Image (cartoon, rainbow, N blue to C red):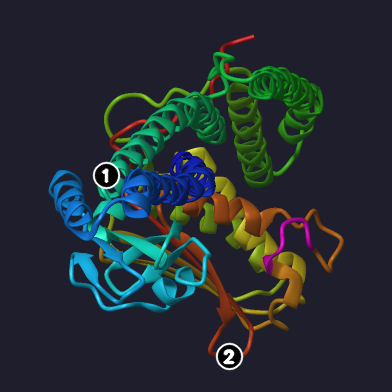
Amino acid sequence: MRTRLTLLVAAVSALILVAFLVPLALLVRTVAEDRATVRATADAQSLVPVVGTADAATIRLTVEQLSAESRRPVSVYLPDGTVLGAPVPRTPAVALAARGQSLTGESEAGREVVIAVQGRADGTGVIRVGVPRDELTAGVGRAWLVLALLGLLLVLIGLLVADRLARTLVRPIGELSAVSHRLANAELDARVTPSGPAELREVAGALNHLAGRIQVLLVQEREQVADLSHRLRTPLTALRLEAESLRDPDDAARVTAAVDGLERAVTGLIRHARWRQTPAAGPTGSDAAEIVGERVAFWSVLAEDTGRPVTLDLADGPLPVGVPADELAAVVDALLGNVFAHTPDGTPFTVRLAREDSHVVLSVADRGPGLPAEAGRRGASAAGSTGLGLDIARRAAQATGGRLELGTAAGGGAEVLLRLGPPRTESGPASGLTRP
């Protein structure tokens, strides 16, 4: 923008200078020609009394003296055909002046001033003074050079002023852009110092107000999530009491373990919503082999009840990934929950965990009807669920530098590949929120 403004001012300045300097340059040339013509006319008129009354010898002497002083070719044409002074052949202008008409005309050498002298006894004499082209353009080149330098100087001054003005516009815009990028990176404490024109100051104030409003709304949202999560503790407590009252010890232990896991998830959600996320120094993450093994063992009980054969293929651990244990468990539960929700009872599925280069790849494949076309969109579901399971897995993978891939398994069912990156060693951008 700064360059464009400067170029715009340069173009406008150049057009204005051309509009003024070109006519001025032509005027300078015209003035120079007129000045030389006026001097030549004055010299010719000074000879009129001599040519009209003196003899040929006196006229010759006077003409030679005037030619030496003015350094112009001066010629006098007497009625008898005698030419005194510069031996210039008769031109059409001289022939016309011999009839009694004085004039100024152009010639091959420049310009000629011709004056008719009447009153001689033998007829009309003619005085011709030639003006060389060098005299007609004397000082014009120097004047044009001065005008060109003046125009260039004015353009440079205009460019300097335009650059300063453009800088006063571009600098506040650059600050607005920088703060916008910081806000996009979740630095909600970033603010702009209003500066520049009134319009830009108004935009800066609006951006600061928007950042503050986003911060307030985000705090309110987290408070609501925390409150909602906290309300789940009461039914969880009741569920725990019901589990402990079961007669079968195995069923009681299994349900109690499930309640414990759900309670840990709720506790993690509350902590995540109420506190600013500040990752601890050093590597963070979990062992994918351990988490996947535990969650598959948990779902295997339900798989056995619904007649679903389960194939588990885990690479030798540990397999560290950049996802906390509770989040990774939620991701695995979401993927396995999709299998149970979208395939009929008795459908076999396979869970594989392997290392590929710097990533750990989790594969969940089944032999069901496959994934619908809208499965990749957030919130889309054809089975009455929330439709957020795949989105949770996708965001977890992207947070580690990986990705989520949806495809078709070898048996015709659905296959979900989750590529997880290694644990992070540097903390990401802070959210800009402090503890309420």
Residue 305 visible from this viewpoint: no
Which is nearer the N-term, disc 1 or disc 2?
A: 1
Q: Is residue 378 magenta?
A: yes
User: Foreground residue, 355 or 375?
Assistant: 375
| Relative image position of residue 235 (x, y in whole percent) | 81, 28
Q: Using the image, tell me which numbered label, if any, was put on residue 139.
A: 1
User: Foreground residue, 316 or 281?
Assistant: 281
Residue extending farthest right: 384
Q: Quadrant of the C terminus?
A: top right
Residue placed at 25% from the left, 43% from the top?
142
- Judge from the rendering whether residue 158 lies leftward or rightward of residue 201; answer left or right: left
How many numbered discs, if any?
2
Residue placed at 40% from the left, 69% from the top?
106
| Relative image position of residue 111 (x, y in whole percent) | 35, 63
Q: Using the image, tell me which numbered label, if any, was put on residue 411.
A: 2
Tell me the quarter of the picture where residue 272 sits.
top right
- Judge from the rendering whether residue 165 lies leftward or rightward of residue 264; answer left or right: left
Q: Main secondary structure of the magenta part?
A: loop
**Mark 1: which amino acid?**
Gly
What is the secondary structure assignment of the residue under circle 1?
loop
Q: Which residues are magenta?
A: 376-380
User: Foreground residue, 71 or 250?
Assistant: 71
Residue placed at 67% from the left, 55% from the top?
389
